[in-house]
Amino acid sequence: QPEALLGELLEKIVALLPPAWLYPETTSARIVLGDRAFKSGGYRQAVQSLKADIVVQGETCGFVEVGYMWERPPLDEGPFLTEERHLIDTIAHELSVIVERKQVEDEKARLLDQLRHADRLATLGQLGAAVAHELNEPLANILGFAQLAAKDSGLVGQTRQDIERIVAATLHARDVITKLLAFARQTKGETTRIDLNCLIKDGLQFLQSRCAKSGIDLRRQLDEALPQITADRSQLLQVLTNLVVNAIQAMPNGGCLTVTTSAKDRWVSLIVEDTGTGMTEEVKERIFDPFFTTKGVEQGTGLGLSVVRDIVVSHGGTIETETRLGHGTKFIIRLPVAPS
């Protein structure tokens, strides 16, 4: 029954075992697989039992056990026949084959799902890049004319405010397009040797006023002996900005934001840690998925962390996340030290 669920198969199999033994009326059986147990009807702990391991790819993942609820006279192996030992070993082997087959089917399904997801992302990237390129020119015109109109000294209060809103909305749209192009890998970076501490100091200058307005204590713990890295400066600024803005949005009632650098074993680390709302495990598993967001429409597009991960990976680095719901989140980025 290849289409049946594994649990259903094991329930049926364990029900077949007691009638196959010499004293079926006093026999109980169970199959244990990982943390799941399947027992025959009226199961009671056996006082005398036969047991065989379920081995999949060289590792024991469970066992099958058949036993008597009351003591029986001795035969070949305790109260059991040699044929019963052969039988339970054969059952364990067949169960190993079934479990391994199910694991292969599950892995195949998982890989197919990943392939479909990758195909959707590729299509989405191509579409996003095309749309972004088409929107760039009209947005530039809107922004240019709005900024030009804002310079008119004869504007009254409400009109000036409306034009400022147009400028702000256009800048937001341009930021979304930049992220789309980065996501679709349509923008090229220029790598140079960079002092990460200097980049962080420059980047935080533009964000510290926003932290102050939100009641957030911004702390820097920078390793002064930090070696240089090879990277694209604008892309790393984008990484820092995205992580810091996310941290600010995660602390609506204020808190502490700490940016740390360190070096170890030819790797430079950048850590951005907040004391905000944190995340559930379900959200943590999806934060790097493109367009996944828990924020409102006005606060995020769901591309920020996806772009961050892509930038870090393209620089030969890694990114890890540590979080506790209600206690904050920590992003740990490691980048290779520049060759001497």
Image (cartoon, grey):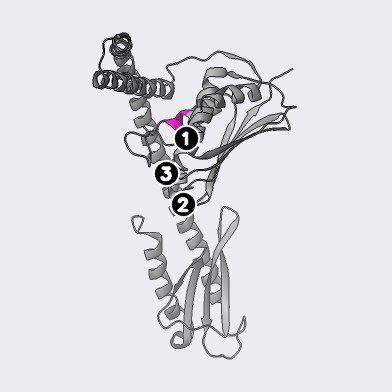
Q: Is residue 304 magenta?
A: yes
Quarter location, residue 5: bottom left
Please identify the quadrant where the N terminus is shown.
bottom left
Left or right, 172 with respect to 243, comes to left
| Residue 25, percent from left and from top | 43, 88
Q: Nearer the viewer, residue 235 or 203?
A: 203
Q: Amino acid at mark 1?
A: Lys
Q: Kindly state the secondary structure of the residue where label 3 is placed.
A: helix
Quarter location, residue 60: bottom right
Residue 46 lies, with reference to residue 266, above or below; the image says below
Q: Nearer the viewer, residue 200 or 262?
A: 200
Residue 298 lies, with reference to residue 93, above or below; the image says above
Q: Kindly state the secondary structure of the residue where label 2 is placed.
A: helix
Image disc number at residue 110: 3
Q: Are marks 3 and 2 in contact (CB under 8 Å)?
A: no
**Which residue bears the numbered disc 2?**
103
Q: Kindly state the secondary structure of the residue where label 1 is placed.
A: helix
Residue drawn 60% across the image and 85% down it: 75
Q: Amino acid at mark 3?
A: Arg
Magenta span: 303-307
Q: Main SS type for the magenta part?
A: helix
| Residue 314, percent from left and from top | 54, 24
| Residue 56, percent from left and from top | 55, 56
**Which residue bears the numbered disc 1?**
213
Spatial separation of the CA atoms under disc 3 and disc 1: 46 Å
Left or right, 158 with respect to 4, comes to left
Q: Earlier in the sequence, mark 2 or mark 1?
A: 2
Q: Earlier in the sequence, mark 3 or mark 2?
A: 2
Residue drawn 56% across the image and 18% down it: 232
